[in-house]
Amino acid sequence: MNINKHRLSNLNKVPNLTYRASVLSNEGIGDVFKSISDFFSSKIESFVNIFRSNGDELKNMNFNGKQLFKLSKDINEIEKKYSFSTIRPIEVSTIMGLKVNLLDLTGSVNKGVDIINENLLKSLDELDSVVSKMLADEEFRKSVRKSYDFDYVMRAQIALGQIVEDVIDSKSTKEVFTVGELIPNVNSLNVVNKQLIDVNKKINEKTLKKVEEEIDKITEKVEALYEAMSDKDIDKASKQSLLVLSNGLEQVAKLITNSISVYYILMKENDTMVNTVKNIKQFARN
């Protein structure tokens, strides 16, 4: 699977709900709109499916970072026994469409994980608050003030998307690379492995579990919001509250999608390191 192509496909499923909210009326930002369900809520269901799908993808991830600790001894032996010219033609199955070597990839993934750790849980918590208020707080639904700002989420999801674009060619189907394409020299094996171990340490299992739980909770609440709008239990809302909801749903959905892509790349890079060492050792036996 080409991770970037898959990411772009998922992003294309995110409705431009903010635009729909902005054109509900040209009369003024403080107006309270009636009968919003026909024009607006049909797109809410798409977010239910997106969040549910993203949650499922996250639950199926297994980083296997512990395998990297076992590679140090083998890497040290490789460095002592082989020149780069000897091992560089060895082929390794790796990330489809990879555009950079593993040294550069590790730096990019490290930056991506930092962005995720700084923004993902925070944004999920804020979106949960917005959806909850849309469901239960009439004053919030009629509010004319901007009470939540998801601009930081937009910046984070764009930055993550750019990281993925920089390292994965969405149109490429190439997934077998030589050692010479993956590392610049023999010593880089140890450098990449150590840096990769450090990146994996930033992936906290408890935090991942918390992210999964938050996505599940938001999915349920967005589904409840869709049902409330469809049943016309909620048929009035201000343009401002709809804009806040719309922007939150869009930007967080994109942030989760791009975060999952970075996680996938890290998983695949872990496997690539293991496969690279394994293939070099197999070459030695032959």
Image (cartoon, helix red, strand yellow):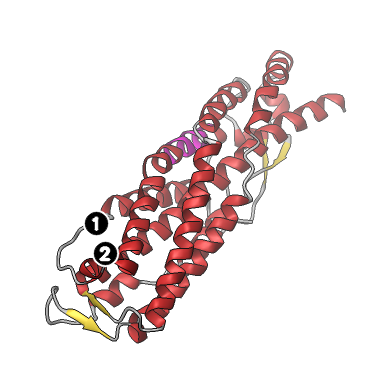
Quadrant of the rendered structure where residue 44 is?
bottom left
Relative to residue 179, is residue 251 drawn left or right? left
Q: Amino acid at mark 2?
A: Val
Name the residue carrying label 2: 244
Give the x, y percent position of residue 202.
Answer: 49, 32
Tag 2 and tag 1, C-beta contact below 8 Å: yes
**What is the residue that sits farthest to the right in this orientation?**
286
Taking the spot 47% from the left edge, 49% from the top edge, the residue there is: 259
Residue 262 placed where, x, y %? 50, 46
| Of 70 and 135, the residue lying toward us | 135
Residue under circle 1? 148
* Secondary structure state at the residue bearing disc 1: loop
| Magenta stretch in the rendered image | 103-112
Relative to 100, does residue 243 appear above or below in the rendering? below
Which image quarter is the C terminus in?
top right
Q: Is residue 82 above or below residue 95?
A: above
